[in-house]
Structures are given as C-alpha cells and as structure tokens.
Image: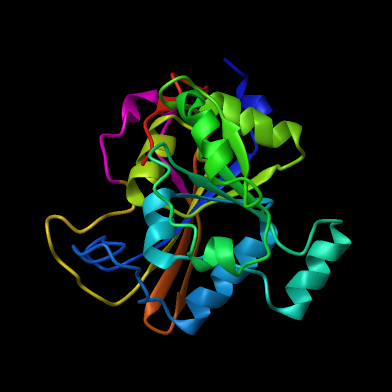
Amino acid sequence: MSNRRDWPHVRLMMATTLDGKIATSRREAARFGSPEDARRLETQVAWADVLLFGAATLRAYGTTYRVRREALLRLRQRRRKPPQPVTAVVTSSLDLPLEMPFFARQDVPRVIITTESEKDRATVQFCGLAEVIARGASAVDWNAVLAEFKTRGLKRVLLLGGGHLNAELLSLGCVDEVCVTVSPFVFGGTDAPTIADGNLAAKHWRGEPQLRTSKLVGEEVFCTYRFRKRSPINSSVRTQ
C-alpha cells in the first residue's frame, strides 16, 4: 500500500440541485448550471493535470472538458503544462463506444483506467486512441493509480463524477477538497443520482469536511470544503 504522500491532490467538483441531485432519474447529461458555473468549471479544468470521471459520465456526455479561454491557456503555458489536461476514464466493462466525440474528434491526452483482468482487451480496443493503465486484479487499486499519477508528475486531479465513483473515492479517503455549486432547481426522484451514490465508509475519515469558501452569485451558491489529511485504506473498487 502506498503512502498518502504518494498521492496527488484530488479536488471533487460537482453541481447539484437544491434537493441534492446531479441529474434526473433518467441520468442524462446534466446541463442546469449557469454561465458562471461553466466559467468556474473551466478555471478548475485549467488548474488540473488530470480530469477523472467514470464510464457512465462519458457515455452521458460523449466528450470531455477543454480549456478554451486564452488567459487560462497562457496560465498553463507559464506552468509549463500542455494546453489540455489528461482525461482519465475509469471502466471495467470497457463499454465506451469509439464513435463518441471523445475518441473521434477531440485531440486531448486520453487514458483508460481499468483492471488487470481487462488489460489485454482494453489495449486492443483502445489502441491508438488512449493509453491503458491497469491496476488491481478484479477491481481498480486506487492506491496504485494515484501513486502512478504522482510518479508521472500529475499532481492535481479534478474528479468530475459520477456519483458512484465519487462515493468510492470519498469513502477511501482519496478526496482533499469538494467544490459544490448549488443551483436553484428541484429534480426529485428516488433514483436520481447524487454527488455520492453508495455506502460511504465515513468511519475512516478524520473529522468532518471544513467549509473554506462560499459565494453567492445570482441564484447559485459556490462552496468549497476541505478534508483533513487521512490515511489510505483498502483501495480496490469496482468500476463501470
């Protein structure tokens, strides 16, 4: 097991409705954020070395996020970073249609994170389209994946969902910060996804998240919470 110091900084960023949903029960791509929320998201994308999300999120959107504003591109250049961060998609099913814009029309660094049992199949399926990182026999070993990021100099991870992946990494103590946009909508639905869909092992956390910033812009509230440093626990999880 790697040491917590071997991990990069992980920042979770999500937009939620007043009733805590990140999408409707149909789980289609959520597009309820304001232009200000989109601007803040792009700023965080520019901050990141890696964008991390699950296969269901990619299937819903078909694409990843890009840095477009010239000021942010110049900022990345000054940091001696490539124009776009790496996009890492987590999947064990490998159910990712190759005709999606993410593979077919986007010139961004792409990584598929999967299990060792799927490494050979993934290498063939995504040959020429994405690098494959396989860690963990039948479930992704997040200690190993995060340590790999850090070894490669990828020190800033922006976690963008979905709810199941968020819940796993929160439960494992991998998340350092949570940035939440609360938007003035109510979706309802017992099956509608939330920021953390799953059973969280809160007993492994050291204290509650601490509110660091909050700002009201129009009808939205932007909040940032920070977790105290935690020790890693069993970090093999199942992916989509």
Q: Quadrant of the C terminus?
A: top left
Q: Is residue 224 above or below residue 237?
A: below
Q: Quadrant of residue 120?
A: top right
Instruction: Tell me how many marks there are.
Output: 0
**x, y (%) of residue 200?**
30, 34
Q: Residue at x 49, y 75 (%)?
A: 37
Is 200 magenta? The answer is yes
> x, y percentage for residue 99?
48, 64
Q: Which residues are magenta?
A: 197-210
Q: Is residue 223 left or right of residue 192?
A: right
Residue nearer the viewer, 104 or 234: 104
Question: Can I make out residue 13 in this image?
Answer: yes
Splitting the image into 4 quarters, where does residue 229 fall? top right
Taking depth in this image into account, of 164 and 92 the one nearest to the observer is: 92
Seen at 67% across and 26% down, the residue is 6
Q: Residue at x 65, y 28 (%)?
A: 147
Query: Picture coordinates of residue 42 (x, y %)?
Result: 60, 70
